[in-house]
Amino acid sequence: MPELDAYAAKMAARFHTFDQDGDGHISRRDFRLMAERVAQSFDVTDRASALRESADRYWEGMAGLADGNLDGRITREEFVGAALASLHQDPEAFARIALPWHRAVFAAADHDGDGLVTVDAVDLMLVSLGAEPDQARRVAAEHRADPAGLITEDEILDAVTAYYTTGEPQHAFAVPA
């Protein structure tokens, strides 16, 4: 499969996990639901407002790229088209739009703030963002852990950046039929 086709398929799969309420569109509400899910998954309700704020900024950046008709909703076609036009092969665009959100998710998982999480925390991060549990476990186990079984924030953020900017195959999010 050519790289652009693989990338488009990967982004289509990710669209469905962003659509938290299942209404066929991505909206600010979906991002807020994602923030609540992360806060609950890591039992950090005290940080829920920070997660909501970073989710709102992520939504605004994504809407700026993808909500072509400015209706406050992003369709699958708008999402995939914007990803192809703006994120594919552009880690800087990804960093501007999404990296703060992913840092906030990592911070929720990193209870002691040392910049390290366990494989189980990576698994839970992926599930809280919409990955199927079996797929999340497999992907989490693929990360290079240090001898104590810990994974750095940089490694996670590098993997997330590669996910959104390359056509490399992904295994965390199911591709809908």
Image (cartoon, rainbow, N blue to C red):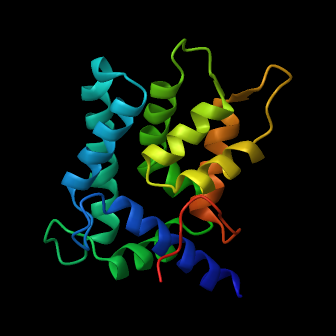
Q: Quadrant of residue 17?
A: bottom left
Identity of the residue drawn at 26% across and 66% down: 22
Q: Viewed as shown, does residue 130 lie left or right of 78?
A: right
Identity of the residue drawn at 54% across and 79% down: 8
Spot the residue most to the right: 147
Say if residue 6 shows up in the picture.
Answer: yes
Please tell me which residue lies in front, 119 or 28. Answer: 119
Residue 101 on image: x %, y %: 42, 41
Residue 136 on image: x %, y %: 60, 50
Spot the residue most to the top: 112
In the displayed structure, would residue 135 be above or below residue 16?
Answer: above
Identity of the residue drawn at 26% across and 46% down: 33
Please tell me which residue lies in front, 101 or 136. Answer: 136
Q: Viewed as shown, does residue 13 lie left or right of 37?
A: right
Residue 58 on image: x %, y %: 34, 49
Identity of the residue drawn at 45% across and 35% down: 105
